[in-house]
Structures are given as structure tokens and as C-alpha cells.
Amino acid sequence: MTRELFYADAIREALLQEMQRDENVYCFGEDIGDYGGVFGVTMGLIKEVRPMQVRSTPLSEAAILGEAVGAAIYGLRPVPEIQFGDFISVAMSQVVDLMASYHYRVGTALPLTIRIPSGGMLHIGNFHSNCWENWFTHVPGLKVVVPSCAYDAKGLLVSAIRDNNPVLFFEQKRMYRVIKDEVPEELYEVPFGQVRDVCDGDDLTIFSYGNMIPLAEEAARELEKKKISAAIVDVRSLLPLDKDGIIERFRRTKRAIVLHEARTFSGFGGEIASLLQEEAFDDMAAPIIRIGSIHTPVPMSPNLEKAYLPSLNQVLEAADKLMRY
Amino acid sequence: MLTKEDKLKMYHYLVLTRTFEDWIFYICHNQDQKNPMVIGKGYLSTGQEAISVGASYAMQENDWMAPSHRDVGAHLLRGMSMKDLLLQYMGREGSPTKGRDGNVHLGKSELKSLAFISHMGAMTAPANGVAFAMKYKGEKNAVISFYGDGAAQQGIVHEALNYAAVQKLPVVFVINNNRWAISTPVSTQTSVENLADRAVGYGMPSSICEGNNVYEVYDHVASALDRARAGEGPSMVECKSMRMSGHGTYDMAKYVPEEEFEEWKKKDPIKWAERILKEEGLADDAYFEKVKADIKEQLNKDIAEAVKHEQVRPGPQELADVYAE
Ligand SMILES: Cc1ncc(C[n+]2csc(CCOP(=O)(O)OP(=O)(O)O)c2C)c(N)n1
Ligand SMILES: [Mg+2]
């Protein structure tokens, strides 16, 4: 049985069902207990699970993520929340130094999932809007996923919780109560390392993920009017990356745009562009175009933030350029 | 010793802060959400203004401060105009952060204030830096470092306090203990009865004051500042108060027991100051009414001026200022 669920509710359902299935799974973080989290994602969860299985903590991200490591070593499957993704910076050492290298050095697995509400478009400035996912794709030992629909939010979260490695789960907070789609009631996994075909197309492919998928879809509809047929591929699992899937999709259209909300410069798009350049050069009909945010802090003012973020026009112009190349 | 003039001036700033923030609250609840006047949410110091006003009034001209997000009173007292704050909240041309940041995320070197970032407690460390620079230059100035009962649980705060103590930096740590950090009561944030009890562990003296009595806050902070200026090192002043609103204007604080609000209503800082001023024969009800009416009039004038400013617009300056010349 499936029914439409909001992105936030799909996450809540995955957490609840996984906690019911396995008592080793537990959730903790600032204000997530009785209050239900600042975005209401964990609303009421505390009443439906075992004592201490959902728990509010002090305002201490480094201690929260450190707890996750210790509890995972002891055999639990911790699912800490970082209230706003931006605040993970104060706990960086626990993630990149400790967590990421642990299994490689010591041989003990760390089955934990960090929930990281991320991204902008809400006009709340540089400390509540950043997309820092590619800080972490540079770190071996971590896994990084970014769901862009409710179905993937549930399925990727279930996979993350069951994975025996530290997974950084980048929730797109703008999508919580905006994005809604069909979600099975039962538990299911969306495997890591597989792209999702959002729509097919013949002329070019937009590789994207997270908050930018709706923009890619809008662009594809506009391009349709100009008789340009654009495929959209949701990369969704940045690490591990579905290299074969990306190369194979690219070969179908021979032209590509890489689109993400994170800043273009030194962003994850560079990884996809260079992968294609290295592996599919012979099939390349035009240079890859990267589109992301400009290289400034995230501005608060709606007008400035709009100019900071990728725009529909940029995507349309890029498509035009690719087709005329 | 505070003169009559001092006491009346502090009263003025209590009312100024309250009036300004009441307006922010009102607008956030009554504006057209599609075309808002105030961008984002308000984070108000309603009911705890005495901490910010009393502490900053104790500063001398060349002292600096690192305000937290509930220190509009200190900003106003140290020379930020109400119009500056309005422009900041509205994201308009002329705002202190040029629309790049909003609400309480501001500060101005010209006014000797550090600009707050959201990451709780982060500003305790740069406050130490200012204090060291003063000491290095042989100046007899000091710094006030403001933070909350939630922020006190951040690692950086513990580092900064120990650091300031062992290096005898001229800092006064003013703790705004308003009993709540979003939905988390201070009793689940820390197991110490008073945050000031921690001072022993850092190796600095501390005191606890009625945070809603502006004159008492002043006395405590003034002697701590004297001590810092005399080269005797940092100290801590814990101000007991209560956050009389939600965390932000969006939050109705349903999780706060009604009795707690009732109890603290009796200790309202403005009424408290009025009581003292009357008891000491320094002012009467007619005076208080006049102060309130004058400030309202000033606010209305400033709003009328502020809305004449254009919303900030993106332009060629968009990439400017990321780096200094
Ligand atoms: C490092 C960090 N984690 C989480 C947050 C989200 N957050 C914003 S304010 C706040 C509570 C702050 O409480 P407190 O320090 O007591 O200040 P108050 O708001 O009560 O004045 C939290 C958790 C943050 N800003 N920074
Ligand atoms: Mg507090």
C-alpha cells in the first residue's frame, strides 16, 4: 500500500518503523523529544517508542556526535540530528577525524546516521542555509546521501540506518512540507550508489540532486516548449557515487548540465564533470556546464538570495548553449 | 554610583528595547507573508531586557562587547539606532549588514561590538581576542561576552572561559540564564544549580544577580569590569531571568508551564525599574507614561523613514566584499 506523504513525514515514518523493528536504533538531538524538533519532523515520536529511544540533549553538537560513535561501537545504531546542518561545523572533528577513519584504522564498524537538515531558499541567512555536503564527500569512510522526494527520503534513510558505516543524511529542509509523493507504508530500502531517473530525454541530461530537482523539472518543461528534450538524473547518493549509471546516462544524450544548490566553485559538480571528461570524452558533444550558487556567503535578503542561487534562466541558457555548440 | 540621570537613562533603554521588540512581534504576526515587512523571524529579549541594558550601561566608552541574539538593548545603548535595527530586520538599503544578514545577526566595529553568528557560544572566543589585544596594547579597557544557558553547553564556551582565566584577559562573561533554550529547560541542559558555579572550575570569580533588576545587573557587571580593567582577569556574572516569549516570533512556547510565565510576569524588568524609581522619588507615573509615548512616537518616525529605503537589490556589488581590498 502506498499513499502520498510529505517529505518530512516520510522521514518520520522511516525513523519510527526502524526504531520499532530494531531496538538498537535510537534518535537523539536538540529539542527532538517532547517538542518534536524545530521542524516538527520527530513530532510525537517519543510517545511511540521505548524509553530513551528518542531523547533531547543539551546544546552540544560535538558531544552528540561523539556519543554516536561510542554508542555505535557498543552495538547501538544511533541516529543523531544536527538541528540545522550549518551547526555540524562545531562537531567537525568527531566526524572527519574520528568517525570517518575508525573502521579503516581499528576494524570496528560504526553503524550510525547523522540527520542534517540543510539548504536554503528560506531567507534565513548564512548560518541556516548552507549546503555543506561536499565537505564530507572529500572524507573517505563517510557516506553522503541527499534525498529529493518523499519516497527516497524514507528509502534512503532506512538504508542509512541499516548501513554499517557513518552516513550523512542531508535532508532538504525546504522540502519538508512542500514535496509530497507516493510512499509505501511498509519498510523498503533505496540502495546507495544508484542514480534515479527523474525523467527521460534525448537532447541533454541534467545531473542534479536535492533542492535543485524541482528547478531541473521546471527547466525541462520550459525546454520542451522549445523542442529540447532534457533528461533529469537525480544523483542522490554522492558517496558512494553511481559512476557507471552517470556515464551510461550521459552517453544517451552526449550533452550535460550539472546543477546543484551548493556553490559551483569547488562543489560536487566538478566531480561529475571530471568523471564524464575522463570516462566519456569520446561521447562528448559539448563541454559540461556546471551551475551552482555564486561564491559568497548565503545572503539573507530574498532578492540577494535569489541572485545567489541557481536560476531557471541559467539552466535554460546553458541548455541553449549546449544545443548550439 | 548611579546618578538620577543614569537611572532614568537606563529606564529609557528598557522601554526603548521593549517598544521596538513589541513592534517586531506585532509585525511578524500581522504582516502579509507574501510581501513581508520584516524578513524572517524576530528573536526577542522581551522580559529580560534588563540584562542587556544593565550590563552594557556599565561599559566605558572604549570597552567592547560580543552581544548574543537577545541583546538589542545593548546594541541600542551602544549607539545602534532604532532605524538601523529596523533596516536590518527589513533587509533594506542602509541596513548595517546591507541586507546580507538579518535580525539579530549584526554588530559594528565602529560601535565596538562584534557581529554575532548563530553558532551558539562562538563569540566567546573572539571576545577573548579583543581582550587580549587591549591587554597587549597596554590599554585599560575590557570586553563583555554575552551568552545564554543553552550556549553554555558548547565546547567552545568551556575553552574560552578556561583560556580567558589562565591568561587573565579583561573579559566579563555575562550569562543570560533565561531558563530555556528553545524547548529545553535549563534543568535538562545542565546538572549544576547555577551556571555561575562553574566559574570555580575555570578559576575565575563569579556572582549571581537578579537579571530583571536593571540596577542590580549594572552593579554586578560594573564591578566585574573594574576588576578586568585593573588587570585582575575575567569574571562571570550569571543573570537569572526568564524568556517571556517563544524562542522566535513563530514559537508560542506552549511547552513552558503557565505558572512559570505567571511567576516571572511579576518580575517584569520595566515594572521593577519603575518601582525602584518611584521608591527613590526619582520619577512618577506621569514620567513613565511620557517616556513610553515619546519612544512610540520616535519608533513611528523611524519606521516611516525606514520604509522609504528600497529593498536591497542584487547588482554588480553582489560579489563585492567577500574579500577585503
Ligand atoms: C551550535 C548551535 N547549535 C544549535 C543552534 C540552534 N539554536 C539556536 S538558539 C538555540 C538555543 C539557545 O539557547 P540559549 O543559549 O539559552 O539562548 P536563548 O535563546 O535562551 O537566549 C539553539 C539550540 C545554534 N544556533 N547553534
Ligand atoms: Mg536560554
Image: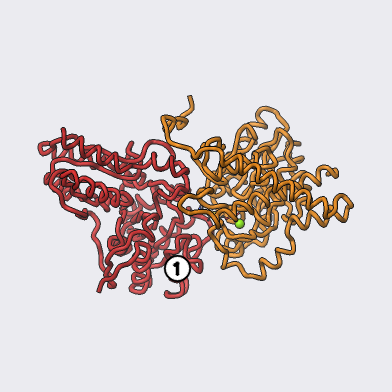
Ligand 2 quadrant in view: bottom right
Residue found at x 50% / y 69%: A34
Give the farthest residue toward the right. B281
- The tally of labels here is 1
Q: Which residue is mark 1?
A: A43
Q: Is residue A276 left or right of residue A107?
A: left
- Mark 1 burial class by Cα count in 10 Å: few <14, some 14-19, many 20+: some
Question: Is A85 left, or right, of B208 in this rendering?
Answer: left
Dot 1 amino acid type: Met
Task: Report whether residue B70 is seen.
Answer: yes
Q: At 79% from the left edge and 48% from the top edge, which residue is drawn?
A: B219
Q: From the top left corner, tell me how far across and down residue A85 is, in percent.
A: 42, 51
Q: Quadrant of the C terminus of chain A?
A: top left
| Residue B166 visible to an observer of this rendering | no
Q: What is the display colour for chain A?
A: red
Q: Which chain is orange?
A: B
Q: Is residue B250 above or below residue A19?
A: above
Q: Mark 1, chain letter?
A: A
Image location (x, y in percent) of residue A166 = 34, 56
Q: Secondary structure at mark 1?
A: loop
Q: Residue furthest left?
A: A282
The N terminus of chain A: image quadrant: bottom left
In percent of width and height, residue B198 lies at 65, 54
Q: Is residue A116 above or below residue B86?
A: below
How has the structure been colored for display?
by chain
- For this rendering, which residue is in front, A246 or A290? A290
Q: Nearer the viewer, residue A200 or A17?
A: A200
The part of the image, by quadrant, that contains residue A2 is bottom left
Q: Position of residue A305 (x, y in %)?
A: 42, 42
Q: Quadrant of residue A50?
A: bottom left
